[in-house]
Image (cartoon, rainbow, N blue to C red):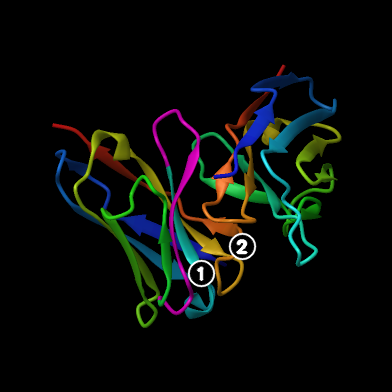
Amino acid sequence: DIVMTQTPLSLSVTPGQPASISCKSSQSLLHSDGKTHLYWYLQKPGQPPQLLMYEVSNRFSGVPDRFSGSGSGTDFTLKVSRVEAEDVGLYYCMQNIQLPPTFGGGTKVEIK
Amino acid sequence: EVQLLESGGALVQPGGSLRLSCAASGFTFRSYAMSWVRQAPGKGLEWVSVISSSGGSTHYADSVKGRFTMSRDNSKNTLYLQMNSLRAEDTAVYYCAKGSSSWYDRDYFDYWGQGTLVTVSS
């Protein structure tokens, strides 16, 4: 199985300041279809996960443009340009270039 | 609006069985692969199983293979997870999740239900 490693484990951010989360995979997520199968989810407290980004850098419907994704191969980053109170929760990266889909361990983002 | 509503979670003894259901609405259910993903208390996300849009193909995590069976009834817009020989380590919130396409290769989960809690304990 592909191992997904996220850092940091937790992040405390002042509102309006940026935040960055790293995700590394144990093998390349670039497929011969030309797509990189790396996704980001946010699980707000008491809620199910919600999709933020698909194929590294595509924002899902309704996701604010303060969220951005980047990276290639095995190294990826999710950035929030200006953190707001509603952005608190657990962030997970996920790969599905091959079954089983696997998730990173999660990064907890809280507000200072 | 896409809605996924899980049900069937309960307290069950080790070795017991349970069937979870997920009622879908707001999209053409028969056109999309569906998955189950679980989350043990205070832990991260673990994919459990996936089924193709037609129901003709399924895959399972090694941790549940041979014990869990996923199925769907496209006429009822409902997804199922039959869970047998339950163990303490199966204790988790179980989410059903909609795939973005009909097949599950290189797919992702664009909508999730609220989850149903399964507790395996004597």
Please tell me whether mark 2 sits on a helix, a strand or a loop: loop
**Which quarter of the rendering shows the N terminus of chain A?**
top right
For the point 65% across and 32% down, the residue is A5
Please indicate whether residue A21 sits to the left or right of residue B98 in the image: right
* Earlier residue among tags 2 and 1: 1
Structural distance between the alpha carbons of marks 2 and 1: 9 Å
| Left or right of A55 on screen, residue A89 | left
Viewport quadrant of the C terminus of chain A:
top right
Q: In this figure, which residue is indicated by the disc labeled 2? A: B107
Q: Position of residue B40 (x, y in %)?
A: 39, 35
Q: Looking at the picture, does residue B75 appear above or below residue A41?
A: below
Q: Report the residue at 30% width, 35% height from top.
A: B89
Left or right: B11, with B101 as reference point: left
Picture coordinates of residue B76, whole percent (x, y) = 35, 78
Snapshot quadrant of residue A83: top right
Circles 2, 1 touching at the beta carbon (< 8 Å): yes
Reply yes or no: does residue B74 show up in magenta: no
Mark 2: amino acid:
Asp
Q: Is residue B6 above or below residue A82?
A: below
Residue B91 makes an appearance in the image: no
Image spot of residue A54 (x, y percent) = 72, 55
Question: Is residue A45 visible from the viewing direction of this image?
Answer: yes
Chain letter belonging to callout 1: B
Circle 1 residue: B33
The span picked out in magenta is B39-55
